Image: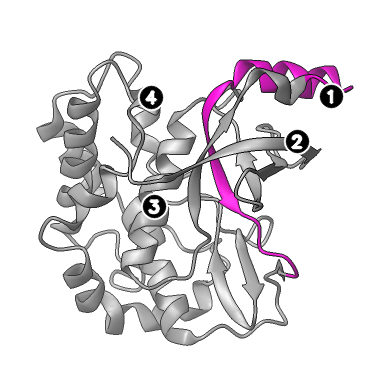
Amino acid sequence: MSALREVVATRYVTPLREGGSLPGIVEGDDLGTYVCKFRGAGQGPRVLVAEVIVSGLARRLEIPTPELVRIRLDEPIARYEADEEVQDLLHASLGDNLGVDFLPGSFGFDASCEPDPEVAGRVLWLDGLVANVDRSWRNPNLLIWHGDLWAIDHGACLYFHHAWAGGPPSVSGAADRFAAQPYDTSDHVLAAYADKVAAVDAGCREALGGTTLEEVVAEVPDVWLGDDPAVDRAAYVAFLRARLGGDQWVPGERA
């Protein structure tokens, strides 16, 4: 069961030829425009799971991030697509995919931008928690929209789940190993704000307390999880809770 709003794709507009997953711009039956990340792309549905979980955590931490929806692709969507690679991707992704609200007029974060220091600290804290390996100057995955910093593209987080081909391992040991992994900020686009993380640490932990992790993981559609979605959900919660139980990963804590 997912809390994501469902939208039906009415038109495939254009591919975004970034990386290997070939996301595309689509229009929905709600008259919205979305960046669609396809279940049938080579990286598989786990990337979509990471997007939903980390975006949900970001919202709880008051980090601006675009709305996510389940965007359904039906057979006719590929009928008029001339590019064979895109047509194959659309056919392989019929059903539920991930739609990311398109932010018109936004632009990519660069060295001329000065984000709110507290928000930058929260982004760094979150990236440490979820082990985000994709927030460098080469690929910041940050936008500026209406003067605010927006975090996008979280598919490279939660690397541990790519080893779950046969389902989650025995959680205790594996979760503890993930919890103990330090987080390297030397290549992070917001590394200059590492000294702001200590001030937001307690508030971030409080925001993710109680049943928040369960609520966030519940937003992932069953179809993107393994044969037993309940087992997968419990494992994600256990891994994140174990990580929250330590501080080895907190940027700025251990120079």
Asked if marks 2 and 3 touch (Cβ < 8 Å), the reply is no
Residue position for label 2: 12
| Residue 30 coordinates in the image, percent (x, y) | 60, 49
Tell me whether the residue at label 3 lies in contact with that at label 4, contact meaning CB atoms closer than 8 angstroms. no
Of mark 2 and mark 3, the one earlier in the sequence is 2
> How far separated are the C-alphas under marks 4 and 1?
26 Å
Q: Residue at x 17, y 71 (%)?
A: 206
Q: Secondary structure at mark 2?
A: strand
Distance between mark 3 and mark 4 Cα atoms: 18 Å
As shown in the figure, which amino acid type bears the numbered disc 4?
Val
Q: Residue at x 44, y 79 (%)?
A: 119
Tally the marks.
Answer: 4
Q: Nearer the viewer, mark 3 or mark 1?
A: 1
Identify the disc placed on residue 190.
none
Kind of residue indicated by mark 2: Tyr
Q: Which residue in the structure is indicated by mark 3? A: 54
* Residue at numbered disc 4: 223
Q: Viewer-proximal residue, 71 or 174?
A: 71
Residue 173, above or below 87: below
| Residue 225, quarter of picture | top left
Q: Is residue 89 visible to us here?
A: no
Helix, strand or loop at mark 4: helix
Tell which circle, 3 or 4, labels the residue nearer the N-terminal end. 3
Q: Which residue is mark 1?
A: 81
Residue stretch in magenta: 79-105
Snapshot quadrant of residue 198: bottom left
Sequence-wise, the earlier of marks 2 and 1 is 2
Cα distance, mark 2 to mark 4? Answer: 22 Å
> Are the residues tagged 4 and 1 within 8 Å (C-beta)?
no
Q: Is residue 134 visible?
A: yes
Separation of disc 3 and disc 1 at Cα? 32 Å
